[in-house]
Image (cartoon, rainbow, N blue to C red):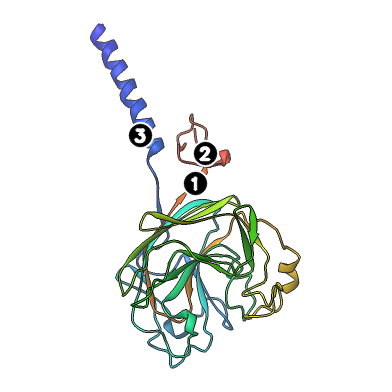
């Protein structure tokens, strides 16, 4: 009898440990299946949805490759590749590397320059000629061989953010990262907490933090302090966005950027931080930051 009671107690302890272990175990989602772009939507400036202009976006060796070998000149073929689902509270990690040379016709500031857009508008809601989505960008820059050049910066097409308690309308803000020259792989991560805050990590080092991402500040570089929305292909939606100035961005799409320099992406994974926060539920996770108890399973 004592032996049976002992075995029952031991089983309960083991199950309790398993439950605790499962609740702590992170469940990362791969956003890229390694074979095709079936979960992604393509939008080029001045092209219809899902036109893969000059075979720019490619899948090769479990990578998403952005290539320009079929171009004679760039001709403002700015493009973004949007994941199918918007997110709010999450971690996103990925590896990237710049390769080769910039295509002819690309702007000087786009040499070894790309990025991933966060809290982005959808591909479908872009104006036909729009160069960039209204979003928050983790800007990725490669070293040019000599001087320091940080990566993991933030740029703000149609947006602004708060640092040190003040709204910052600068279009791009540098991180404190190291410089990564050549065609080496670099690991990056962002921690996005809805409309509260965003942190950028490069090679596991937190290089930039900011708060309250929001609509406003003009579309690209403000002209002499003015909040200009008239450049870079924005036309039909100007009144829509100016009416939303100051609105906090709490969720949006994730999009890979193509802006004239070849770049590869791999190991694109997401950890959703929004979910069931009831410890009694089967799918409770201790790392969830935002509760969505409608997802709870019992």
Marks 3/2 in contact by CB < 8 Å: the verdict is no
Marks 2/1 in contact by CB < 8 Å: the verdict is no
Tell me if mark 3 has few (under 14), some (14-19) or many (20+) residues whose alpha carbon lies within 10 angstroms of its own: few
Q: Quadrant of the N terminus?
A: top left
Mark 3 or mark 2: which comes first in sequence?
3
Q: Is 128 drawn above or below residue 195 in the view shown?
A: below
Residue indicated by mark 2: 276
Residue indicated by mark 1: 273
Q: Secondary structure at mark 3?
A: helix
Q: Position of residue 290 (x, y in %)?
A: 55, 43
| Inter-mark Cα distance, 3 to 2 | 16 Å
Instruction: Report the disc number at residue 124.
Output: none
Of residue 85 and residue 200, the one placed in the foreground of this image is 200
Q: Secondary structure at mark 1?
A: loop
Of residue 182 and residue 239, the one placed in the foreground of this image is 182
Q: What residue lies at 35% left-to-right and 68% top-to-bottom? A: 35
Q: Is residue 121 left or right of residue 9?
A: right
Q: Position of residue 79 (x, y in %)?
A: 51, 77
Residue indicated by mark 3: 21
Quarter-wise, where is residue 206 in the image?
bottom left
């Amino acid at each position: 009898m004592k032996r049976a009671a002992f075995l029952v107690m031991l089983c309960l302890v083991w199950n309790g440990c398993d439950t605790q272990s499962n609740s702590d175990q992170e469940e990362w989602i791969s956003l890229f299946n390694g074979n095709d772009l079936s979960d992604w939507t393509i939008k080029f400036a001045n092209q219809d949805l899902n036109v893969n202009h000059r075979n720019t976006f490619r899948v090769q060796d479990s990578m998403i490759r952005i290539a320009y070998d079929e171009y004679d000149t760039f001709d403002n073929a700015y493009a973004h590749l949007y994941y199918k689902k918007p997110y709010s509270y999450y971690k996103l990690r990925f590896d990237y590397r710049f390769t080769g040379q910039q295509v002819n016709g690309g702007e000087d500031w786009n040499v070894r320059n790309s990025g991933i857009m966060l809290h982005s508008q959808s591909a479908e809601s872009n104006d036909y000629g729009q160069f960039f989505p209204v979003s928050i960008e983790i800007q990725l820059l490669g070293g040019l061989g000599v001087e320091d050049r940080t990566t993991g910066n933030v740029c703000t097409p149609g947006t602004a953010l708060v640092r040190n308690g003040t709204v910052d309308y600068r279009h791009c803000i540098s991180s404190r990262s190291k410089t990564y020259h050549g065609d080496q792989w670099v690991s990056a991560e962002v921690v996005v907490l809805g409309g509260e805050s965003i942190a950028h990590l490069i090679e596991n080092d937190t290089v930039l933090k900011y708060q309250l991402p929001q609509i406003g500040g003009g579309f690209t570089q403000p002209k002499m302090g003015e909040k200009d929305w008239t450049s870079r292909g924005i036309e039909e939606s100007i009144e829509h966005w100016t009416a939303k100035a100051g609105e906090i961005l709490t969720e949006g799409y994730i999009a890979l950027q193509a802006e004239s320099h070849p770049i590869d992406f791999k190991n694109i994974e997401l950890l959703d931080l929004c979910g069931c926060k009831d410890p009694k539920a089967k799918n409770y996770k201790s790392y969830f930051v935002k509760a969505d108890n409608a997802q709870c399973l019992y």
